Image (cartoon, helix red, strand yellow):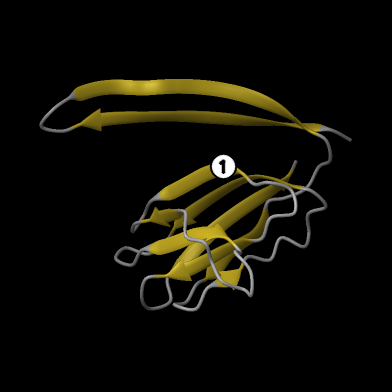
Amino acid sequence: MAGTIRVIQSIRVTNGNSDLPAIGASQVSFVQDAVGGPTPGTVATSTTAAAVDLSELTTEGWVRMKNLDDTISIHWGPDKGASTIQKIGTMEAGESALFRLFAGATLMLEAASGTPLCEVLAFED
């Protein structure tokens, strides 16, 4: 049974050089071929990169992550081989990330320090 995933994104920038309202605000809906997710939920991270367990999904799709810590950053990216993270993103304290994961990719997380918690909600494509 198919479902629908609706993605809503926007960004607003206010700094010394500009005050730009909701740049690129958009809403897009995608057909979810198979119902699945959210998984895995809250994940404890560490300073050693580790793969996020998405084994409940057949084909990985949209992922929303949120750093639940109020001081520690969490880095994220794919496995570049030998269980080593290729850092392509950082979530500072309280920040989130939203993206569509390439099917079969291994998503990894690594804490800048300590053991912050990260909410990871991944869905079937």
Task: Name the residue beneath numbered marker 1.
Answer: 99
Three-letter code, disc 1: Phe
Left or right: residue 125 compared with residue 69? right
Which residue is drawn at the image coordinates 25% and 22% (left, top)?
Answer: 20
Seen from the viewer's position, the closer of residues 1 and 59 is 59
Outermost residue to the right? 1
- Is the residue 61 above or below the residue 116 in the image? above
Q: Where on the picture, by quarter, is residue 12?
A: top left
Residue that protrudes farthest toward the left in the picture: 16
Q: In which quarter of the image is the C terminus?
A: top right
Q: In this view, does 32 lie to the left or right of 114?
A: right
Total label count? 1
- Asked if residue 62 is positioned above or below residue 77 in the image, the reply reads above
Residue 99: x and y in percent read: 56, 42
Q: Residues within 10 Å of mark 1 (few under 14, many from 20)?
A: few
Q: What residue is at 36 percent from the left and 76 percent from the top?
A: 113
Residue at figure coordinates x 38%, y 51% from the top left: 95
Picture residue at 61% right of the left edge, 64% below the top: 79
**x and y percentages locating residue 66 in the rendered image:** 47, 54
Q: What element carries label 1?
A: strand
Location of residue 68 in the rendering, given as x and y in whole percent from the top left corner: 42, 61
User: Quadrant of the image for the N terminus?
Assistant: top right
